[in-house]
Image: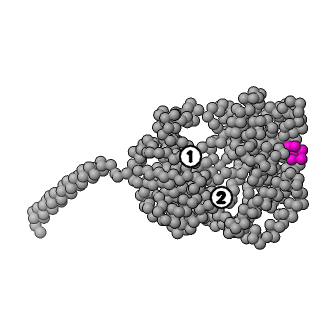
């Protein structure tokens, strides 16, 4: 090709290319305009059906808070409440009908075991890799998710609660001061305090009418009476397997100690029939000077005490240490109930929208909106951060007992250390107490009951509780206890129960 022809060909090719690019650019711009126009239209709200339980009457009509949530998150929440007394029956009926909502509350897998089969069959979303991408849900403590997991995987959103703060030593500090005693730091010191409260007239009325501690004994002694001495929880983990806490030497030592305390008057004589709800009554009435309860209960009960005895001073302290120098706290599960997400009706895009909703209601702002309604209309936020419902809010049906049951909640480590109106110095002391706790998780959280336990568990528990109580009050001897333990160690059914429970534990924790 001659040079002039070659030059002309290059120019023509460049011109064609420029025209082509211009046309593409024009088409692209038109496409962007069209896309911009399309994106300016709001996406259709995502329908999300949620079924949960109700402890009180369910709200009637559509709550304004739900409308606000719908607008903010571009969803259409359809909330259904089941009365708490009917929850297990209704949930099993829903599963049998295969007409499940998108999100479903489960109180306890042991009361609704059919859902475990449904999980095995892939009916619900596995959430392990999702929750970490949502900042408020990701703030839940690792143990909360671990306790809620099945076979090492997370199939639910747990309704979060604190892990600690439910066990502290509530003591009449004014009684300690009158008798020249210090808060007990060891189990021996605890015995001395309880005996002194029973025998040395700590209230100064000249009458031997006080006792050391009020502990509930019905339907059975609280597990902390044994765990304080070093068992830790209801099951002890050893070399990857589980052993019942009451088989341990520490449990035997605990029973010997509490029998000694009981005989000295250090425990209310009504112990076998006392229920947890009566702890407050016995403390407020001045019958006992010590109990184990939530950290904040010391302040709450003290407010009642001081109405009749202004000098009373009930204070929360750390638990005393066992013989090995450690304080043994039983860690709570960190949740009450779990939400499953239906895989049949929920694709991945909808799953992410559901998690967006639950992430927002896991924030304080979102939680208050969902549970209490519109700020300054349905509730007021007090200077101490607590919520005070207005009459308007109550009329509409906002209630923590029901309207809060569809959300997982915001995690508050100090929830059991505070209450509205608590003085700042008391709250600071309570926070330090909670911070000092190093609790032991119950290894059986999230495990199903064994087959033998389903058949015989109620009878086993009754016999165990009866024997524990009888040894403490002296109706049975410690030798009777030894025979009782041996009977169960030799019982093939109970051996199978222990084996299955250990197998469930290993399966849950396999990597």
> How many numbered badges does the structure rendering display?
2
Sequence-wise, the earlier of marks 1 and 2 is: 1
The answer to whether residue 429 is seen in the rendering is no
Does residue 151 lie above or below 211 as drawn?
below
Instruction: Quarter of the image for the N terminus: give it.
Output: bottom left
Residue at (63% x, 36% y) in the render: 419
Is 264 included in the stretch rendered in magenta?
yes
Residue that label 2 marks: 445
Quarter of the image where one finds residue 281: top right
Residue at (64% x, 67% y) in the render: 507
Residue at (48% x, 33% y) in the render: 376
Residue that label 1 marks: 56
Does residue 424 lie above or below 45 as drawn?
above
Residue 240 located left or right of residue 410:
right
Q: Which residues are magenta?
A: 261-266
Instruction: Quarter of the image for the C terminus: give it.
Output: bottom right
Measured as percent of width and height from the top left, residue 463 is found at 79, 61
Quarter of the image where one finds residue 249: bottom right
Measured as percent of width and height from the top left, residue 99 is found at 47, 63
């Amino acid at each position: 090709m001659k040079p002039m022809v070659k030059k002309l060909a290059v120019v023509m090719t460049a011109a064609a290319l420029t025209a082509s690019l211009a046309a593409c650019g024009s088409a692209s711009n038109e496409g962007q305009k069209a896309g911009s126009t399309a994106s300016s239209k709001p996406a259709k709200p995502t329908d999300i059906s949620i079924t949960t339980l109700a402890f009180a009457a369910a709200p009637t009509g559509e709550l304004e808070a739900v409308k606000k949530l719908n607008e903010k998150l571009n969803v259409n929440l359809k909330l259904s409440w089941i009365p708490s007394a009917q929850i297990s029956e209704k949930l099993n009926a829903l599963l049998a009908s295969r007409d499940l909502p998108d999100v479903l509350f489960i109180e306890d897998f042991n009361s609704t075991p059919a859902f475990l089969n449904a999980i095995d069959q892939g009916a619900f979303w596995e959430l392990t890799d999702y929750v970490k991408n949502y900042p408020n849900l990701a703030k839940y403590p690792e143990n909360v998710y671990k306790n809620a997991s099945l076979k090492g995987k997370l199939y639910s959103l747990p309704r979060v609660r604190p892990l600690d703060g439910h066990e502290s030593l509530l003591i009449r500090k004014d009684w300690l001061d009158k008798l020249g005693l210090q808060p007990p730091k060891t189990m021996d010191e605890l015995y001395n305090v309880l005996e002194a409260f029973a025998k040395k007239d700590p209230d100064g009325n000249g009458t031997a009418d006080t006792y050391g501690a009020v502990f509930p004994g019905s339907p059975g002694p609280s597990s902390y009476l044994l765990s304080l001495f070093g068992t830790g929880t209801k099951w002890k983990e050893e070399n990857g397997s589980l052993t019942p806490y009451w088989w341990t030497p520490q449990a035997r030592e605990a029973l010997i100690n509490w029998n000694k305390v009981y005989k000295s008057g250090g425990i209310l004589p009504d112990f076998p029939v006392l229920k947890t709800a009566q702890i407050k009554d016995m403390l407020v009435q001045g019958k006992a000077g010590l109990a184990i309860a939530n950290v904040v209960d010391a302040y709450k009960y003290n407010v009642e005490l001081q109405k009749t005895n202004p000098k009373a001073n009930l204070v929360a302290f750390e638990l005393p240490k066992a013989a090995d120098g450690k304080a043994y706290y039983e860690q709570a599960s960190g949740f009450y109930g779990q939400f499953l997400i239906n895989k049949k009706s929920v694709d991945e895009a909808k799953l992410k929208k559901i998690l967006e909703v639950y992430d927002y209601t896991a924030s304080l702002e979102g939680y208050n909106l969902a549970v209490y309604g519109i700020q300054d209309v349905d509730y007021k936020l007090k200077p101490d951060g607590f919520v005070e419902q207005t009459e308007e809010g109550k009329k509409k049906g906002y209630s923590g007992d029901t309207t809060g049951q569809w959300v997982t909640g915001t995690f508050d480590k100090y929830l059991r250390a505070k209450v509205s109106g608590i003085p700042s110095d008391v709250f600071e002391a309570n926070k330090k107490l909670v911070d000092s706790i190093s609790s032991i998780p119950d290894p059986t959280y999230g495990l199903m009951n064994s087959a033998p336990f389903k058949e015989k568990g109620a009878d086993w528990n009754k016999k165990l509780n009866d024997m524990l109580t009888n040894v403490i009050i002296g109706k049975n001897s410690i030798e009777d206890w030894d025979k009782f333990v041996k009977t169960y160690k030799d019982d093939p059914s109970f051996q199978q129960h222990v084996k299955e429970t250990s197998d469930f534990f290993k399966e849950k924790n396999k990597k």
